[in-house]
Image (spheres, rainbow, N blue to C red):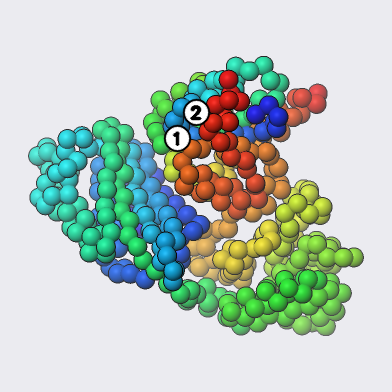
Amino acid sequence: MTRVPYDVVLMDVQMPDVDGIEATKRIRATTSLRQPRIVAMTANALEEDRDVCLQAGMDDFLRKPVGIRELAAALERVARLVSADSTQRVA
Amino acid sequence: MELLACKARDGNLELAALIDPGVPRRIVGDVTRLRQVLMNLLSNALKFTHEGEVTVRIEAEPCGEGGLHEIRIAVRDTGIGIPAERLGRLFKAFSQVDSSTTRRYGGSGLGLAISKRLVELMGGTMAVESEVGRGSTFSFSFQTRAGTEAAEPELQRILAGKHVLIVDDNETNRFVLTRQASNWGLDPRTVATPAQALTRIEAKEHFDVAILDLCMPEVDGIELARQIRKTRPGRRLPMILLSSVGAEETRGLAEGDAPALFGAILTKPAHPDRLRAALAQLLGGDASVGRERAESKPIDSSLGQRLPMRILLAEDNHINQKVALKMLERMGYIADVAPPTARRRSWP
């Protein structure tokens, strides 16, 4: 994470050991200036699951099973955030 | 699927089908049985889901010689779910979750029992996972052989006998494209240089569609397209651009006039299905088939060039991981995968 600054992390929410929510909180807790944009991927499709993800610091939300069109749409949305991020850094 | 889509539209439901790239286009099997099982699971899912979505996912894994595949079909809903203690009774004839279900939803309780039996007759198994209030996933899997490729009649009709101009400086590419085009019933007219292409267009040779390679010495595909437009200002010749991932010329492809010049831009090596779909779309014009095709229009394979981003995939499930990487690849992204242990170490 620290060596290669990623623009986007596609984050599975239900992972063993460290789940996606926890991982996101840890990433957001670091002082790194280059924060990736994080897209949650979760089988839990309820509104409240979405809120949990967004509150943990995720930027977008995909329901599993993730289809290619939804993934492409999410990447287009996130790309706008990423490009805004890099403009800010330059400025 | 189309039959049930209307039903889904009546309710407040999304119906989605996700077919993984590895699934053979054709399989050998009893289509009537397969359809019956799928229809039963889908109509159940739609019946018991009041909000959210019903998703059908089809995955395939090669599992032997001669095109043998394990096909897994899962119907997932965000419906009312089934209590754990009732799951066992589910596949029994004349059984429903409880009698109030019958009053509210109707049905004989035979559907699942029959479906399970049909799947077993295909040599497969059926399973269910469910959580009350969250939804259910019914899945079944069976082994079958991939069928031999046969073009759909309507695609064949659209492409039949159409003159396709192929311009590529690379001999192997020319060979492959020409062969593919003839296999699809097209009439390929292949040239090795933009100059030859222009000569034939100026000589008023008839072309219905053109496939241009982007990276060619002297005149590239985009410049050639501009010249073709100038040469034939009145009659629009639909054109497809084949670009390469990471090529110098590809950068900024989306900003220039390329999107206006080309009906489709595909990354090489273009998947034959996508190339054929793009050709059919451009040749089909406003025919009804063209509209149907628009629904399944090819994924933008140049997304990764248009919106370059470094992507990390944090997904532990091996199959999901493979599927995600394949989808990203189709959009032109090469993502890194975060290994679970490293992830724990590097995210303190």
Residue contact between numbered discs 2 and 1, judged by CB atoms under 8 Å:
yes
Q: Look at the picture and state if A25 lies above or below B239.
A: above
Q: Is residue A34 visible?
A: yes
Near-viewer residue (B275 or B102): B275
Real-space Cα distance between discs 2 and 1? 9 Å
Q: Residues within 10 Å of mark 2 (few under 14, many from 20)?
A: many
Q: Residues within 10 Å of mark 1 (few under 14, many from 20)?
A: many
Quarter of the image for residue B313 reads top right
Near-viewer residue (B346 or B255): B346
Query: Pointer 1: what residue?
Result: A42
Q: Quadrant of the C terminus of chain B?
A: top right
Where is residue B329? Give x, y as percent: 61, 51
Q: Is residue B319 left or right of residue B342?
A: left
| Disc on res. A20 | 2
Q: Secondary structure at mark 1?
A: strand
Residue at the limit of the structure toward the right, as seen here:
B218
Q: Image point 74% across, 29% down: which residue?
A: A86
Q: Image point 45% across, 23% down: which residue?
A: A52
Where is residue B105? Give x, y as percent: 17, 43
